[in-house]
Amino acid sequence: MDIFHLDKHPHVELCDLLKLQGWSESGAQAKNEIADGHVSVDGQVETRKRCKITDGQRVTFAGQTVLVKA
């Protein structure tokens, strides 16, 4: 499992996280994957494109998981 560090930010938007992890090539692709129900947060399907992901949450997409840490 990968770890994504928020550094000093309080959160990262879900669509941005997919781009930053290299899981999608563009913001539009990330938003489409989220809207189509292909992304889960803490084991639950998440369809809100700009959902705020905070410390301790796990995001899964296409068999890959990342843990978000502050």
Image (tube, rainbow, N blue to C red):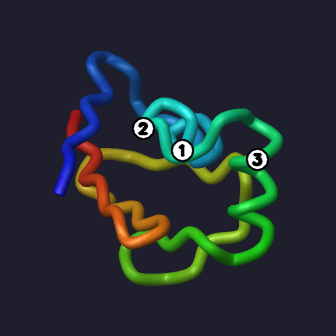
- Per the image, label 3 sits on a secondary structure element best described as helix
Relative depth, front residue between 28 and 58: 28
Indicate the position of residue 13 as horizontal and vertical percent values. 58, 40
Residue 54's place in the image compared with 10, above or below, is below
Label 1–label 2 contact, CB within 8 A: yes
In this view, the residue farthest toward the bottom is 44
Number of numbered discs on residues: 3
The mark found on residue 37 in the picture is none
| Residue found at x 17% / y 57% | 1
Relative depth, front residue between 47 and 1: 1
Residue 63's place in the image compared with 49, above or below, is below
Indicate the position of residue 30 as horizontal and vertical percent values. 69, 48
Where is mark 3, residue-wise?
Answer: 29
Q: Given the image, on which type of amino acid does mark 2 rest?
A: Gln
Where is mark 1, residue-wise?
Answer: 18
| Residue found at x 29% / y 53% | 66
Where is mark 2, residue-wise?
Answer: 21
Relative depth, front residue between 8 and 47: 47
Circle 1 residues within 10 Å: few <14, some 14–19, many ≥20: many
Label 1–label 3 contact, CB within 8 A: no
